[in-house]
Image: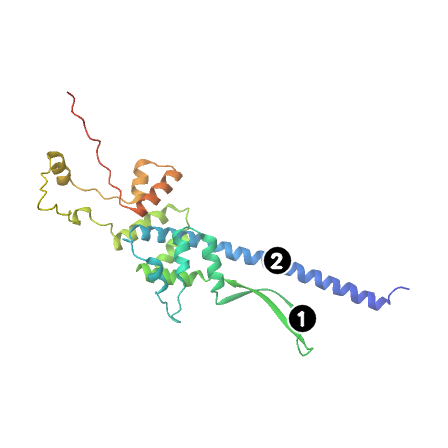
Amino acid sequence: MGLPAIGMQGVQTGAMGQATRDQQGRDRMREYAARLAGTRDSVEVLARFAQAREERGAGAALEVEFAATSVEPDGASLPAAVWVALRQGDLDAVIETLVQHATEQFLITEHEQLDASYRIATVAECRGLPDIDRLIAQFAAFVQIPSDVVAIVSGWGPDDPRSAAEIERLMDQRYPPPDPQATSPVAAPHDAPVEPDAAARAVSNRSTLAMSSSELTALLSLTPEQQAMLTTLVRQADIVVTAEARTSEP
């Protein structure tokens, strides 16, 4: 014996309503994923900012200083892990941390269920939205660059040639590379005097040319793989290029 017509209609209506809610949930998830992807280019530019700052860090624990940088109006700051992920270029980790510290929620779907008191309550399923403006504000305060400037450069995206050039210019203005001539040589022991030869005197009297890694990359026309290797090397130590020593023929 079949169900009454009105009962069958109620079942069909309920099934259609559930299908509609499921489709709306999928649509909202796609929209949420697009919102996350929309922050990725800006985060990548900030990562290049952080890597350029690390090249001029002089061994300082920059992640600690970054975490200690508070931003108005609430004075809260993002954790040191954000800076670590930026300098390593781990964009997914940065976005995930921003989601964990989100102050704005994105509604995915809502459904009704019985609460503990057997009353129908509406339950919302939400996801945190990464606050890229908050990251930019803290980052700008830390590197001492106006936040509107950082926002504009990050808005250009990583593929715009203006981004790399402006990052180097802004970093060089505020954190110039150390002057090799400012480092005083270690004095030799009094009981072991050393007489410098003519070649050493000639090198010490020569002018010094300081270049950033991006400038050297452009000069040598390095491939992306070679550029990445050079960036890693200059991040660890100062590189000095000398002329090949000439051997005298008998």
Q: Residue at x 49, y 63 (%)?
A: 100
Q: Nearer the viewer, residue 62 or 120?
A: 62
Q: Which residue is most to the top?
A: 250
Q: Residue at x 33, y 58 (%)?
A: 62
Tag 1 residue = 112
Q: Residues within 10 Å of mark 2 (few under 14, many from 20)?
A: some
Residue 33, label in figure: none
Quadrant of the drawing holding the C terminus: top left
Find residue 108 and report its horizontal and vertical position in percent. Answer: 59, 63
180 horizontally vs 164: left or right: left
**Circle 1: element type:** strand
Q: Residues within 10 Å of mark 1 (few under 14, many from 20)?
A: few
> Does 161 appear above or below 117?
above
Q: Nearer the viewer, residue 11 or 61?
A: 61
Residue 145 seen: no
131 horizontally vs 1: left or right: left
The three-letter code of the residue at mark 1 reads: Glu
**Circle 2: element type:** helix
Tag 2 residue = 27
Q: Residue at x 76, y 65 (%)?
A: 13
Find residue 204 and report its horizontal and vertical position in percent. Answer: 14, 40
> Does 232 appear above or below 140?
above
